[in-house]
Amino acid sequence: MQTATADNVAATRQKFYDRLSPRAMAPLWEVLKGLVPEQPKSKFAAHVWKFAEARPLLMEAGDLLTAEEAERRVLVLENPALPGGSRITATMYAGYQLIMPGEIAPAHRHTASALRMVLEGNGGYTAVAGEKTTMNRGDLVITPAMTWHDHGQEEKKPVIWVDGLDLHTVNFYEAAFMDHFNDKSQILSKPEGYSESEFGSGFAPMEPRRPFGQTSPIFNYRYANARPALMRVASAGAPDPHLGHALRYVNPQDGGWAMPTIATWLTHLPKGFETQAIRSTDGQSLVVLEGEIAFDIDGKTFTAGESDVACVPSWMWKKMRATKDTVVFTMSDRSAQEKLGIYREERR
Ligand code: GTQ
């Protein structure tokens, strides 16, 4: 009789598995540990993209093709652990977008929600749902799911911003739709500033309306408002040991995050301040608006200065030290994770 050696046990099991696969079945016990891990172990890498490197390349792209040809002329920020993945973290897409003088990035709409963190506004604009908004450095401009949007620049300087989209989340669910408008620019039906006036100045319409569903009806959170607010709050107390001085962008209709899938907030770290270690299950991307941050991510160090973008994948210990007075914008998939009840964080 044959003895049950490890080899022939494995061979017998493999023969069994070989009969499962043609029937579209598989043994769970071979894959269980990967499917149900004890804790997150991100496949992605922490990384910093330097604007000083990206900007000349973006301008080269400006010579290579028009915004109209490209539809969106963007250098995608690809996490170095997944080249070709078009993603900065597990769920989020990000990129540097350029509009050259006189150009229009034509109107379209899609299921994915988008945000723009403006780096060089120079009089450029985005039109959303019939309303134009001028873009200035530090403005957070939102395009809610399925709203028409086109971007343009009538002045003589280029416009550059960081795009953040939830498109990988939408695509994961295989729920993505998109349409092109029948003209380059959409039809404007409201004066500039309409949404901010109607919903963003301590008022709301008498007859309740949710023009963008679960997304905030304010689609430009201006730095001209946000920065003084952050600085005034910061001047009145000590920074939180783990978060610094942080304020989140809020949907005035429900007090929640401004976007259903993407959480956004603004942080001020005074020069010399270092945060305590924190880790969280959201994948974060940070855009430095002012100053400079020295990051310690799971023991690896990076620095990010003005207009640089950093990413911090899920569940990596993060510390940030401000080498100058610093303001940084953060976007993450926390908003979606909270709705699914899976967001978690830990502080040291
Ligand atoms: O501006 O609509 O970076 O549709 C990627 C896809 C920007 C946009 C991106 C897009 C857009």
Image (cartoon, rainbow, N blue to C red):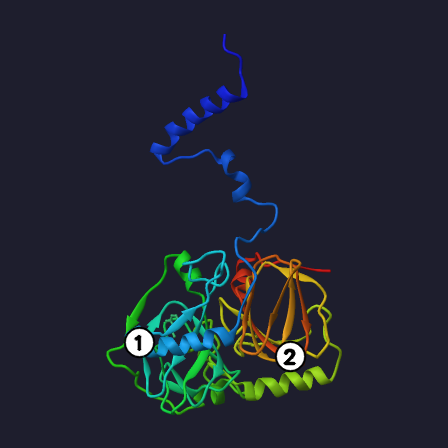
Q: Gap in Å between the C-alphas at discs 1 and 2?
A: 35 Å
- Please give left or right for residue 137 compared with residue 231 in the image: left
Instruction: Name the residue carrying label 1.
Output: 65
- Residue appearing at x 41%, y 70% in the figure: 75
Binning the other alpha carbons within 10 Å of mark 1 as few (below 14), some (14 to 19) or many (20 upward) gives: few
Q: Residue furthest left?
A: 182
- Please give left or right for residue 24 compared with residue 91 in the image: left
Residue type for callout 2: Thr
Q: What label sits on residue 92 in the rendered view? A: none
Of 125 and 323, the residue lying toward us = 323
Numbered disc 2: secondary structure: strand
* Picture quadrant where residue 294 is located: bottom right
Of 240 and 147, the residue lying toward us = 240
Residue type for callout 1: Leu
Task: Say which of marks 1 and 2 sits in front.
Answer: 1
Q: Residue furthest top?
A: 1
Total marks placed:
2
Of 156 and 254, the residue lying toward us = 156
Instruction: Name the residue carrying label 2.
Output: 326
Numbered disc 1: secondary structure: loop
- Residue appearing at x 50%, y 7% in the figure: 1
- Above or below residue 165? Residue 291 is below
- Please give left or right for residue 195 compared with residue 302 in the image: left
Residue 83 in view: yes
Q: Quadrant of ligand 1?
A: bottom left
* Picture quadrant where residue 210 is located: bottom left
Residue contact between numbered discs 1 and 2, judged by CB atoms under 8 Å: no
* Picture quadrant where residue 293 is located: bottom right
Q: Residue 248: x, y in percent? A: 59, 75
Q: Residue 256: x, y in percent? A: 56, 72
Q: Earlier in the sequence, mark 1 or mark 2?
A: 1
